[in-house]
Image: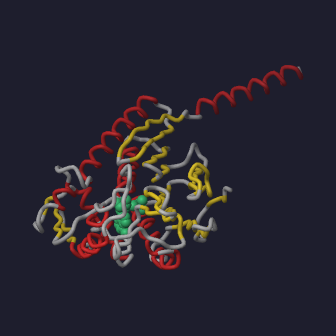
């Protein structure tokens, strides 16, 4: 009799383990190159067909939004806006949304993030084989055109009275938000969107918190921290991302709107964590330009936005609500 009970208990346990295994969803990933960077999307979904359909739709949407927001594609909303000679231009609802968000962060950061920074950006070619520091006179002229007040956004249209718009500091974050919405519409509840390090973690990782690694700016193949949580965007602006070094000075892609030069302060990177990835993206750039102390004042105006500052000397500061672990 006793032996039967043991057999039944063992069978019951095996059944339970079996059930648990079928509930565990194998991740399905797709990677590619878009937005001038490596992108990958991973979904956890029991239906392989649903997962593959959602991934295909995401990559189509990524391409569509990239074309819409590109500064170089002559058919894009942004190119047309930049070359309209001050006339109003009809824009898609997505362009309107990202321009409005950019404008609001430009205002909140008092122009540290300036969405009209294109004249300065176009003088720097960080990916050239032999990059050079732009001519000082040209930089001086370019910064005179940078002023977010030149941009007016209305329902379905935008006008730029001077200069040019550049969405490099916000577009990846905005597009990641759009992809999350698309995945939700497709019934995907657990996914990780990685647009060149702009991360959106949808839902939970099979009931557990996601663990998002933050690169160590001093040695980018290692991590300096791991952010944990569910339903969150994690976006980093860092000197290591794009740039070059001349005579020991790092010239990187986060530029000061008033000088046109790469921002030099105590920071090596700023990571912003919140639900809205476009906001996290714009704020990470703004915080980097402002420097740690002013950045904290800016962030205090936003609810449920956390940040991790990594300084050039390797020390860190995290806002009190950030859930993270140090990784050395
Ligand atoms: P991120 O990596 O998100 O910090 O964005 C950097 C990109 O944003 C650059 O490659 C430029 O295209 C653009 N950018 C650089 N400096 C600024 C700035 N001060 N305000 C707004 N956009 C900027
Ligand atoms: Mg940014």
Residue positioned most to the right: 2
Q: Provide residue 178's location: percent of width, then percent of height.
A: 35, 51
Residue drawn at (26%, 54%) of the image: 69
| Residue positioned 50% across, 54% down in the render | 231
Residue found 45% across the figure and 65% down from its top:
284
Towards the viewer: 206 or 85: 85
Pinpoint residue 214: horizontal percent, then vertical percent: 56, 55
* Image vertical order of residue 249 relative to residue 193, above or below: below
Q: Is residue 31 above or below residue 119?
A: above
- Quarter of the rendered structure image containing ligand 1: bottom left
Q: Quadrant of residue 159?
A: bottom left
Against 303, is 98 above or below?
A: above
**Depth check: 315 or 131 in front?**
131
> Residue 169, can we see it?
no
Percent position of residue 312, x then y: 57, 67
Give the camera-side residue of 312 and 1.
312
Which quadrant would the C terminus be assigned to in this image? Answer: bottom right
- Residue 185 visible in rendering: yes
- The N terminus lies in quadrant: top right
Q: Is residue 56 left or right of residue 188?
A: left
Which picture quadrant has residue 5?
top right
| Residue 156, horizontal then vertical, whole percent | 17, 61
Query: Residue sitting at 36 percent across and 79 percent down?
Result: 110
Judge from the rendering whether residue 107 lies leftward or rightward of residue 163; answer left or right.
Answer: right
> Which residue sits furthest front?
247
């Amino acid at each position: 009799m006793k032996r039967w009970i043991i057999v039944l208990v063992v069978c019951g346990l095996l059944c339970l383990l079996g059930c648990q295994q079928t509930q565990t969803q194998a991740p399905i990933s797709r990677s590619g190159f878009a937005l001038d960077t490596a992108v990958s999307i991973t979904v956890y979904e029991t239906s392989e067909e649903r997962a593959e359909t959602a991934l295909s739709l995401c990559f189509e949407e990524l391409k569509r939004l990239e074309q819409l927001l590109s500064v170089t594609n002559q058919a894009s909303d942004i190119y047309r806006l930049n070359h309209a000679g001050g006339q109003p231009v009809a824009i898609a609802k997505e362009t309107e949304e990202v321009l409005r968000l950019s404008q609001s962060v430009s205002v909140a950061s008092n122009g540290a993030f300036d969405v009209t920074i294109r004249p300065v950006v176009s003088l720097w070619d960080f990916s050239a084989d032999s990059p050079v520091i732009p001519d000082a006179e040209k930089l001086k002229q370019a910064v005179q055109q940078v002023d977010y007040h030149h941009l007016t956004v209305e329902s379905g249209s935008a006008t730029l009275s001077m200069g040019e718009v550049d969405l490099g500091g916000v577009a990846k974050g905005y597009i990641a938000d759009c992809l999350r919405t698309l995945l939700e519409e497709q019934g995907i509840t657990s996914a990780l969107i990685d647009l060149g390090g702009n991360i959106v973690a949808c839902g939970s990782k099979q009931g557990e918190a996601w663990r998002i690694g933050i690169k160590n700016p001093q040695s980018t193949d290692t991590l300096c921290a791991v952010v944990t949580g569910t339903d969150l965007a994690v976006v980093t602006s860092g000197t290591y991302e794009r740039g070059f070094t001349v005579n020991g000075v790092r010239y990187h892609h986060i530029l000061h709107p008033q000088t046109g030069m790469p921002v030099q302060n105590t920071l090596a990177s700023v990571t912003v964590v919140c639900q809205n990835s476009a906001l996290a993206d714009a704020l990470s750039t703004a915080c980097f330009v402002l420097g740690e102390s002013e950045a904290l004042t800016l962030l205090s105006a936003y609810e449920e936005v956390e940040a991790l500052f990594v300084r050039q000397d390797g020390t860190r500061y995290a806002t009190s609500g950030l859930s993270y672990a140090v990784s050395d």
